[in-house]
Image (spheres, coloured by chain):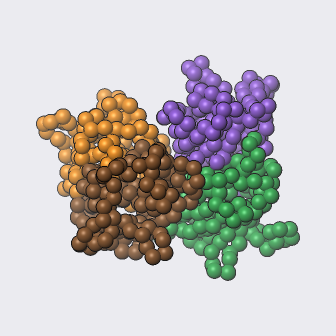
Chain colours: A purple, B green, C orange, D brown
Amino acid sequence: MSEDQGVTDQGPKQVTGGEFDGWTHWPHDPFESRSGPFYYREEADGSVVSAFRAEPRHMNGGGFMHGGCLMTFADFALFAISTKELDGSHAVTLTLSGDFLDPAYAGQLMEARGEVTRAGGKTIFVRGLITGDGKPVFAFNGIIRKIRKG
Amino acid sequence: MSEDQGVTDQGPKQVTGGEFDGWTHWPHDPFESRSGPFYYREEADGSVVSAFRAEPRHMNGGGFMHGGCLMTFADFALFAISTKELDGSHAVTLTLSGDFLDPAYAGQLMEARGEVTRAGGKTIFVRGLITGDGKPVFAFNGIIRKIRKG
Amino acid sequence: MSEDQGVTDQGPKQVTGGEFDGWTHWPHDPFESRSGPFYYREEADGSVVSAFRAEPRHMNGGGFMHGGCLMTFADFALFAISTKELDGSHAVTLTLSGDFLDPAYAGQLMEARGEVTRAGGKTIFVRGLITGDGKPVFAFNGIIRKIRKG
Amino acid sequence: MSEDQGVTDQGPKQVTGGEFDGWTHWPHDPFESRSGPFYYREEADGSVVSAFRAEPRHMNGGGFMHGGCLMTFADFALFAISTKELDGSHAVTLTLSGDFLDPAYAGQLMEARGEVTRAGGKTIFVRGLITGDGKPVFAFNGIIRKIRKG
């Protein structure tokens, strides 16, 4: 189980100022805040996009983005993409997988978009794509499971 | 592609002092150093074990280890487990997937062990298991690919 | 490695007659012919769709489509979706994964659509979705690798 | 969802005669019977092994075993490996993934072995390895979920 993001009093907050002014993030998640922070917002068409700006601290020894950074962002995006289906419920990640398509570099705008391929009971299936300045970088799939109402 | 850990002059270094005295790590990987750092060493039986000590900064908002932290450590472990097969070559991760079996907590000794299920050409298949104080926490699979001699 | 579908003199053939009149299939693949056969064709928009009609012999003991049938069809679809990128080359599957979203039943029209998320060298990343009478049933991801020109 | 193998009156049966005399199989699963049939038995150490003999009908157009055949056998093995944890319950596959390590050929004894990496509630995590005449051919992971008592 990877996340439990609907903790009472520690839920999502809107950001004020900066590049992601008006976007939402999770301020009470130590690893995520330190890795990102990552942000999400609902688009005009009802879909949810997640984003952050790549910095040198997100890179690996080869000078491109670390796979762990992409997977941390993908784990965040699983929950952002499922915002409507979660409807405030707590949930945990059962499984997460991803394909490394192309390198991403410092300075790029990283975005994650995707879709819930199945929800109904407590099990939510998600797939998504992370892009760097619009170019596909990482394709991911995950299953999250609601554990109780927040 | 996620990693390229055999960069000349920026290769693995042995740690001196502390809990992981004598273990090896990658000091020139910004995201990994910041997430971990993570360490590995060869055991008496020739297998390679990776490890780090879980701290509050590795946790998520629910108080247990963030999935992204586990996946970052797993990505590190893919390369550690493949040390012999890589034989100094550069490599990148093609795909990484994992199942979240049980939560891990701050204070636990995190270890990753695994095996190369296939190597021969440039494509190396790895599977492994991360434990927290010896209990299974995360089962992972990955494929890495050698790109050139370091 | 799972497939090698571009064998000389044993390549794809167009079907004449029946529900899939004008579609293409692989007549020289014993397991696939026996499981399916499965068919594909290029659509007006340039994308490739794969299809077959679900029959009782594709079902499991519970009366809905066997997971192995869906994965066999997905493995077929990986190559159909990559038709342009393969350009006649032989290829093998490195990895294939899939999420079982909802059951499919005998009588349904099964279709697989998808996209190449990355191609360039010899490694081709694909993701797709199988539907039964238009409803999502199975989401899959795979990596195939060209091995030589057919 | 891929399987539901504990159907009343249609459960597992012991085979009499032939290479797999005394082994257990599922006689009421149309796709599986036609693909295999596949067999399993408990070993002296309490682990469960699944097996079948590779025939020309299991091969692809390249003359080695079709990926779909391996994944169908892996889906069977998920349930065989989980025999104790299922304890007669019905279950469905949520996700299944696998790496194609090396080709398998007609005439080989195919075996699948593995372990439950986590069980407790209704969600069972499994990983395993298929071998052909003892050589690793396919590494797989899956998650199954109990749906009700059979």
- For the C terminus of chain B, the image quarter is bottom right
| Residue sitting nearer the eye, B6 or C51 | C51
Q: Is residue B36 above or below residue D18?
A: above
For this orientation, the residue located farthest to the right is B17
Visible in this render: residue A12?
A: yes
Left or right side of D40 for C23: left
Visible in this render: residue C75?
A: no
Image quadrant assignment for residue B148: bottom right
Residue at left offset 50%, top offset 67%: B117
Image location of residue C87, percent across then percent down? 33, 47
Image location of residue C8, percent across then percent down? 23, 57
Left or right side of C127 for C84: left
| Residue sitting nearer the eye, B96 or A63 | B96
Image quadrant assignment for residue D34: bottom left
For this orientation, the residue located farthest to the bottom is B44
For this orientation, the residue located farthest to the top is A44
Residue at left offset 70%, top offset 47%: B66
Image location of residue B26, percent across then percent down? 73, 62
Left or right side of B50 for D128: left
Residue at left offset 63%, top offset 42%: A92
Q: Is residue D4 above or below residue D17?
A: above
Q: Is residue B110 above or below residue A12?
A: below
Residue at left offset 65%, top offset 57%: B137
The number of numbered badges drawn on the structure is 0
| Residue sitting nearer the eye, A150 or A94 | A150
| Residue sitting nearer the eye, D50 or A116 | D50
Image location of residue B51, percent across then percent down? 72, 64
